[in-house]
Amino acid sequence: MTPEYEILNPETVAAYIAGNANLTGIVDTDTLEVSEVGDGNLNLVFVCKDGNGDGICLKQSLPYVRLVGEGWPLTPERVIAESRGLAAAATYVPDLVPAYYGVDKENYVLAMENLMGWDMWRIQLNMGNSHPGVGAQLGRYVAALAFYTSFFSIDQGEIKERLAEAINPELCKITEDLVFTEPYIDVDNNSYVDELIPEIAGMRADARLRAEVGMLKYRFMTAGEALIHGDLHTGSVMVRQGANGGECKVIDPEFCYYGPVGFDLGALFGNYMAARARAAVLNRPAEYQQWLADIGLETWDSFEAEMRRLWPERLDKTWTDSFLDAWLAQVQKDTIGYGGCKANRRIIGLAKVTDIQELPHEEHVKAATMVLRTASTWIRDRDTLATVAVANTVFDDVREEVLG
Ligand code: SR1
Ligand code: MG
């Protein structure tokens, strides 16, 4: 497949920047050092630093899924979706995303701040490092998008246009398949160790569970509440230690579209679960495991507090304070359910997580079992669990069951 646009490589990036009027002045292209660091599933990512220490990051989408290769074509327009998500967040929570420098719609290149000195949160969690306060910042990020990109603060006519413009069908289809459909059927994309076969067979035979996954998928496809990130796992969060605790920047919103707010929170919760399972089987210090256990609550509490803080600014007072209580209760149940779906897919389907994959075999089986059991209970029983605090206790019980 020959792409109809120039695919960048580390040798061509400096000339590309020098020839792009919107990017000149950000870095000195004569002294630029460029490396391609895209270790995600989809794109090329070039981090660039010049002789003065200034930087820029370019992200280019390929016309196919990088993880799989040219056999899985995928629209490069996804970088335009990403620029929409980044630009929105840069407007409402500029401290929580890299600075946005613009998008080249002909060559599918997004330009943004080079996050020098920041690390991927998943890697830090895998190493057993804590960044206090990051959960709360992420709750504020989700709340800001939920409030400022939704009917709560945008005029009815305008939001219909935004919703149409932000439609992202190919990327949504990946999520629909990989998160909601494939883990529960037998397809080539799936892979797991033999020891997990009985656990997974049990899930697939559970009609209630399958129906609840169907409900969550249906909501993902129909509930256009706000412009959500769409792939908010711990690999989409960069962290560093700041003067007052951990700091974070959210990256990679290429899956963004108008969807259910609880899907973003659920993505975080599913990945917190994987981090907790890893820490449990590695017998990390009790204080670290407790810090991990509390991140979900911290994220939720911050999300709720920010929504309540912004609520008086809403456009339409038809939505009363009681409505907000009911809406938050629904989002909380969605968070638990989507958390379960996002956790299960990372064990069974395509695109797994290093938290679990890079464990020694015996620990891998135990951690994966913990995740599958907790996740399935979250999905099936999210209405009765109702709060993320209660959902957290499910993990505690399952950990006891698996580790004794
Ligand atoms: C084929 S893309 C696989 C996964 O990578 C992204 O990070 C999303 O999570 C997607 O589901
Ligand atoms: Mg990504």
Image: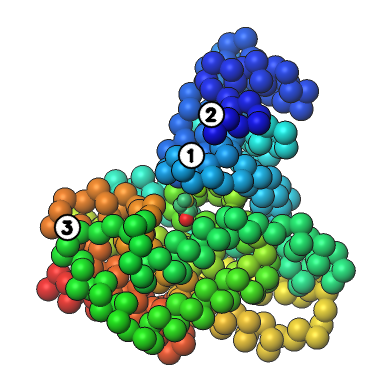
Secondary element at tag 1: strand
Who's the residue at 45% across and 82% down the image? 212
Q: Residues within 10 Å of mark 1 (few under 14, many from 20)?
A: some
Who's the residue at 66% across and 36% down the image? 108
Secondary element at tag 2: strand
Q: Nearer the viewer, residue 392 or 180?
A: 180
Q: Is residue 263 above or below residue 29?
A: below
The image's mark for residue 70 is 1
Q: Quadrant of the N terminus?
A: top right
Q: Is residue 202 above or below residue 170?
A: below
Q: Residues within 10 Å of mark 3 (few under 14, many from 20)?
A: some
Residue 112 spot, x, y in % from top left:
64, 35
Quadrant of the rendered structure where residue 225 is?
A: bottom right
Residue 301 spot, x, y in % from top left:
52, 71
Q: Which residue is mark 2?
A: 46
**Alpha-carbon span between mark 2 and mark 1:** 20 Å
The image's mark for residue 363 is 3
Looking at marks 2 and 1 on the same chain, the residue that comes earlier in the sequence is marked by 2
Secondary element at tag 3: helix
Looking at marks 2 and 3 on the same chain, the residue that comes earlier in the sequence is marked by 2
User: The disc labelled 2 sits on which kind of residue?
Assistant: Phe
